[in-house]
Amino acid sequence: MEREKTGIEGLDNIIGGGLPKNSITLVSGPPGSGKSIFCLQFLFEGLKEGEKCLFLTLDKKVEGIITQAEELGINFQSEIEKNLVKFLFLNINKKLIYESMTNEILSGGYDRIVLDSITPLSEMPIYLKNDEYNSDISVISPEDLSSNSNIPVRRIHLRYILTTLESANSTSIITSELPAGSLLLSRDGISEFLADGVIVLSLDPTMDRRKLSVMKMRNTKHTLKPQDILIENGGIKLI
Ligand SMILES: Nc1ncnc2c1ncn2[C@@H]1O[C@H](COP(=O)(O)OP(=O)(O)OP(=O)(O)O)[C@@H](O)[C@H]1O
Ligand SMILES: [Mg+2]
């Protein structure tokens, strides 16, 4: 099985060399747990391997993310200029957000894709004009969405995003916000079942510690034990 190195020191060793190629991994955790930093490191590692990378953001304007990366010593500037990495802000208030996203994912020829975070998408209605992406989601009407059948609709909604990522033949990470102390593995309670892998980041304020747990990883033997991590210059590392 081909693997994609994560760029996170110590993590690849405990997941058989890296994320399975062409898989989708959900990275979830409470605010400030390191989800976005995880994604930045993952893409930076891809660039080192000569891969083409895409960062889709729904939370923050692109400039903020690039500055955050620079503060950690991760500099994307020259790769952005060479078109090897693209940062794209998707405005959740735009109806055609799905089209912009799907177009970019399917036409960009990306080896690595990050979607940070999936939470706002999983909570919005779906607007699709036609079935040009061959998705079963196009059969869902606005009436279906406004009905009370919230959970199954949401599931299809998330499946649509994941299917798009799968058909791009890239290795992807999606992040999900998780309220502190949540028993679920994602905010929507669904993505963890659809993704190939799940990594949970957590905070222990009392002990002043951060942890990373691999909860699921397709075709991989791994420990479930939470690993101590640090965030410092360069990003996250296992200690
Ligand atoms: N240069 C740095 N050195 C050490 N720690 C840092 C540095 N930059 C950020 N951090 C730590 O990383 C945290 C932010 O990480 P990140 O933005 O990846 O979290 P997140 O899980 O994406 O949060 P959110 O859900 O709010 O988007 C900060 O709260 C801080 O604790
Ligand atoms: Mg973030």
Image (spheres, grey):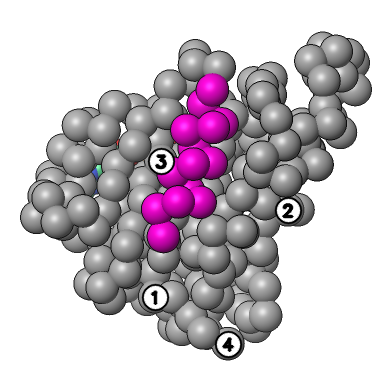
Q: Position of residue 212 (x, y in %)?
A: 49, 59
Q: Visible in this render: residue 140?
A: yes
Q: Which residue is mark 4?
A: 1
Q: CA distance from mark 4 to mark 1?
A: 13 Å
Mark 2 and ligand 1: say if the CB distance to the nearest ligand atom is below 8 Å: no
Q: How many labels were placed on the picture?
A: 4
The residue carrying pointer 1 sits among few (fewer than 14), some (14 to 19) or many (20 or more) residues within 10 Å by Cα, namely many
Q: Considering the numbered disc 3 on the image, is that residue within a helix, a strand or a loop?
A: strand
Q: Is residue 107 magenta?
A: yes
Q: Upstream in the sequence, badge 2 or badge 4?
A: 4
Q: Upstream in the sequence, badge 3 or badge 4?
A: 4
Residue 69, above or below 217 = above
Residue drawn at point x = 67 percent, y = 73 percent: 218
Q: Upstream in the sequence, badge 3 or badge 2?
A: 3
**Furthest residue in direction left, as rendered:** 78
Name the amino acid type tagged 3: Leu
Identify the image quadrant of residue 236.
bottom left
Q: CA distance from mark 2 to mark 4?
A: 20 Å
Q: Which of label 4 and label 1 is nearer to you? A: 4
Name the amino acid type tagged 2: Leu
Q: Which residue is mark 3?
A: 56
Q: Which residue is mark 1?
A: 5
